[in-house]
Amino acid sequence: MSDTSILAAEVPAVGRPRSLAGDAWHDLRRSKVFWVALVLIVVILLMAAWPSLFTSADPRECVLSRQHKPAGGSAIFGYDFQGCDVYAKTVYGARYSIIVGVFATLIAGLIGAAFGLSAGFFGGWIDAVLSRFVDVMLGIPLLLGAIVLAKRLSSDPASNGVFAVTVTLGLLGWTTAARVMRSSVIAAKNQDYVAAARMLGAGNSRLLFRHILPNSMASFIVVLTILLGINIASEATLSFLGIGLKGDAISWGIAISEATGYVRVAAGPLIWPSLFLAATVLAFIMLGDAVRDAFDPKLR
Amino acid sequence: MFRYIVRRLLQMVLTFFGATFIVYALMFAVQDDPIQALVGERPITESQRAALTERYHLDDNFFAQYWYYMKGLLTGDFGTSMTNRKVSSMLADAWPVTMRLALLAIVIAATIAILAGVVSGIRRGSIFDNATLVITLIVLAMPIVVLAPLAQLVFGIKLGWFPATAGKNATLWQLLLPAGVLASLVVATELRVTRASVAENLRADYVRTARAKGLTGARVIGVHVLRNSLIPVITLIGVDLGALMSGAIVTEKVFNIPGVGFNLFRGIRTEDGPLVVGFVSVLVIVFLVVNLVVDLLYAALDPRIRYE
C-alpha cells in the first residue's frame, strides 16, 4: 500500500468552507420545529392551490334543511347555520388567507426594503427623515389604521374585498421590516469587504445590490416570514369585523364571525375554521422562529 | 434628563400631527364622494348631504378641513355619530368598562409573565423553560378572533367555569375571562423579555458581588436581579397597549361588553363613518400619550437611556 492512498483515506475531503446560509441550513435540518412548520405550510399551500384534492363537495352548495346537522358522509365537520358543508368551506377558506397574506407581505417587504436600504445606506438627513416617518407610522396601531384604510379602499360594493385588504395590510405593515433592514444595512456597510469593493471602484448601486443587500437579507426574511403569519391573522380579524373579505369570498374570518352567533347550538362551525387559522398562523411564526435561531450565531 | 424630555416632547409633537394627519387623510383624502363613504351604502337625502358637508367643512380645501379636525380633537370635540350622539359622550360612557377590562388584563399578563419569566430565566434549558417557550410560541400565534370565541365556548359554555358574557355593569368576576383572553395577547412577549433580561442580569458583575457578600439567593434574585430585569418589561406596556386596543374590539364584541371596542365594532358594522373616525382618533391619541409617559418613565428608571 502506498503512502499517498493512506493519506487520501484518512483526510476527509475539505470542500469549500460553509457559508452562513449553509451553516444555517445545517442547523435547520435538525430542528423539529422547522419540519413541523414546513409540513403544515406545504399542506396549507396545497389546500390553497387545489382545494378539490381535499374535498369533492362544493362549499357554496348550501341547503337550509341541513342546518347545523352533525357530521356525516363526506361532511366530516358537519353543517353550519346556512346548511353549508363546514369541511369544504374550511378547505376552500385557505385560498384567500394565503393570497392576502403573501401579497400583503410582498408589498410590505418591497416598501420596507426600499425604506431600510436608503435610510441605512445614505444615512444623514435621508435617514433622519425616513426614520421620523417610520416613527409616525408606528404611532398608529395596525388594526386601527386598517379599519380606516380598508373601509376607504373597499367602498366599491361589488368587490369581494381581497384587493382592499391586501393593499391595506401591505401599506401599514412594513415598519418593522424597514427598521430591521436599516440596522442590518448599517452593520453591513461598515464591513471591510464593502470598503474593499468601494476602493476597487464599485458604484453605489453595485455596493448596495451585490454586497450589502445579500448580507442583510437574513433577519429581513425572518421578519417577513413572521409578518406573513401576522397578515393572515389580521385578514381574519378584519373579515371578522366586517371590513375585510365580503360578498362571495370564503374566508375563515367570516366563517368564525358567522358561527359566534350560534355557538350554543353548534360548536363545529366555530371550532374548525378557528383551528385551521391558528395552525396556519402558527406554522409561519414557527418557521420564522426556527430560521432566526439558525441564523443567529449568538444562540448557538 | 431635561434635554431628553425636551427631545422626546418635540418628537411627540411631530408624531402626533403626523399620525392624526395620516388617519384623517386615509379617511377623507382623494375620495370621490366622501359623504357616501361616511354613510356607507345607505341612501342619503339632500338635506343630510348638506348637513354633513357643513359639519365636515367639505367645501373647504383639504388642509383647512384637517385644521378644523385638529381643532376639534384638541378641544375635546370628536364629532357626532350618524345616530346624532356626541362621540365624546359615547366615549365617556364606554371608557370606564374598557379601562377596567384593560387594567385587569395588564395585571393578569404581568403576574404570569414575571413569575414564569423569572423561573425560566433562572432555570434556562430546564423542562419548565422549554415548555414555557413552546407555550408562548403557540399563544403568540393565536389570533384574537380564534382565542376569544373559543375561550367563550370552552370556559364559558361547555365547562361553565366563568360567565359566558358580561353586561354593562360587569363585575370583576364576569370580566375575568375576557381579561384573560386579552392578557394572552401580550403575555407571551412580556414573558420572553423577562426571561431574557433575567438570564442576562444573572451573569452581571453586581450579582456576583451580591453573592460574594454572602446575600441569600432569595435576596439576590428578588431584589437585585428582579429590579433591574423589570425595566425593559415596562417599555413593553406602551407597545402592548396597541395590541390591547385591537384585541378589545373583538373581545368586547364576543363577550358583549359595551366598552370602547364594542362601540367601534358597532360603528364599523352600521357604517357609521363619523363614529369610527372619532373613536379611532381618540384611541390613537391615547396610544401616543401612553407611549410618551412610558418612555419618560423608562428614562427615569434607566440612566443609560437619557444619556444616550
Image (cartoon, rainbow, N blue to C red):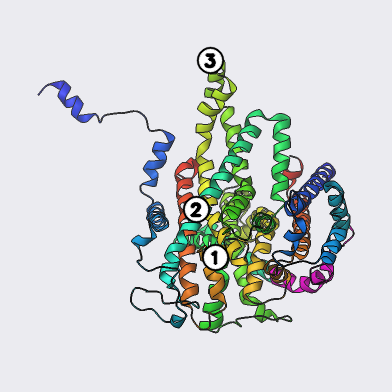
Of helix, strand and loop, which one carries label 1? helix
Q: Earlier in the sequence, mark 1 or mark 2?
A: 2
Circle 2 chain: A
Percent of width and height locating residue A232: 53, 57
What residue is drawn where x is 37% and y is 30%? A17
The local crowd at label 2, few if under 14, some if 14 to 19, many if 20 or more residues have their Cα within 10 Å, is some
Percent of width and height locating residue B201: 60, 50
What residue is drawn where x is 57% and y is 40%? A110
Report, in whole angstroms, how far the alpha carbon at label 1 lies from the one at label 2.
14 Å
Q: In the rendered structure, which amino acid carries the disc numbered 3?
A: Leu
Quadrant of the snapshot with the N terminus of chain B: top right
Q: Is residue A286 magenta?
A: no
Residue picked out by circle 1: A253
* Count of numbered circles in the view: 3
Q: In the rendered structure, which amino acid carries the disc numbered 1?
A: Gly
Q: Nearer the viewer, mark 3 or mark 2?
A: 2
Residue picked out by circle 2: A99
Q: In the rendering, which numbered label is found on residue A200?
A: 3
For residue B68, side relative to residue A267 (left or right)? right
Circle 1 chain: A
Q: In the rendered structure, which amino acid carries the disc numbered 2?
A: Ile
